[in-house]
Image (spheres, helix red, strand yellow):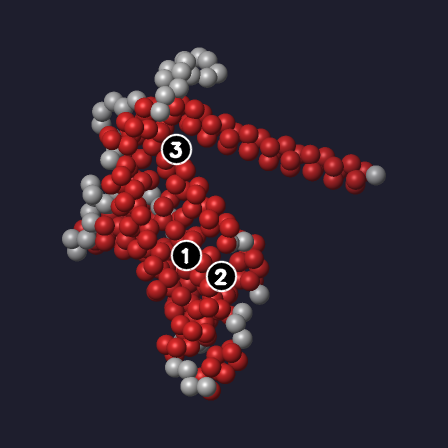
Amino acid sequence: MHRSLSEKLWSIAVWAVVVFFIVNLLAMIGSVVVNSFGTRWFNTWLPAGFTPQWYTMAWDEFHLPDILVVTAEVVGAVVVLSGLIGVPTAYAMARRNFPGKQVVMLLFLLPLLVPPITYGIPMATVLYQAHLAGTIWGVILANLVPTVPFVILIMIPFVEQIDPRVEAAARVFGAGMGRLFTQILVPLLTPGILAALLLVLVRTIAMFELTFLTAGPTSQTLVVALYYAVFAAGVRPGQSIDAMAVVYMVTTLVWLLIALRFVNPTQIVTRAKQ
């Protein structure tokens, strides 16, 4: 009886914390959304009026069309290059044993474990010396540092769950490595590839530190442009900044929903433990 009461109290406490977190999260997001449409808002529950003009102002002042194009170019290039580099590397790591393999795995983990700002500053220095920082290719290269290891670590469990006898049978029937990879392995690995690349996409959209350190005036992504909108010199209406924040939230949310449509994080963790 005492145990049952303790379990009920614990369950109530957990749900209370969850509800408190969700309510606060929705309240913060809701205040930003409401303010992005508000005219004036002083000591009242709602603004005095609503208007979409702040979105028009943000669209023009912050050059959102150009920023969205740059964001799409950076994210698209990072996703494609991460897949082209990460998937074959994950296959090699899963199927081959070689001296120093554990050290290589540790090196793959470092960009994911170490805060990006720690290695971002020296990396940005190198990119500036190579005249790549400030360009879109510098931003792409900087974002590849954490995303390629991310793809590798996600893909290794997917490769390991494929029976090696399938590959052996393909080789018996004359399939070379290129044909084996494109016609046999890629179709079998498609769920894992989609999972990894969609997560890379969402991660790249939200990556601030590395993009901020290497971006120039014409190579800013949406998250960096939002930072400059808040902290750049000059006086700007808070509503226009909130409008830009809403655009950023909606863009990220759309891709996150797409990612969750294909990805079950618990399945990835389970496969990694097997």
Residue 126 locus on image (x, y percent) = 21, 54
* Residue 111, x across and y down, in percent: 37, 55
Residue 221: x and y, percent? 29, 43
| Above or below, 50 relative to 251 | above
Q: Which amino acid type is shown beneath numbered disc 1? A: Leu
Q: Residue at x 41, y 13 (%)?
A: 48
| Quarter of the image that includes the N terminus | top right
Residue nearer the viewer, 146 or 240: 240
Residue located 46% across and 68% down the image? 187
- Which of disc 3 and disc 2 is earlier in sequence? 2
Q: Are marks 2 and 3 in contact (CB under 8 Å)?
A: no
The quarter holding residue 11 reads top right
Give the quadrant of the C terminus.
bottom right
In the image, residue 258 lies at what x, y percent? 46, 48
SS assignment at label 2: helix
Q: Residue at x 20, y 49 (%)?
A: 135
Kindly identify the amino acid type of the residue bearing the numbered disc 2: Pro
Q: Earlier in the sequence, mark 1 or mark 2?
A: 2
What residue is shown with label 3? 246
Give the answer, above or below, for where 34 lies relative to 131.
above
Q: Earlier in the sequence, mark 3 or mark 1?
A: 1
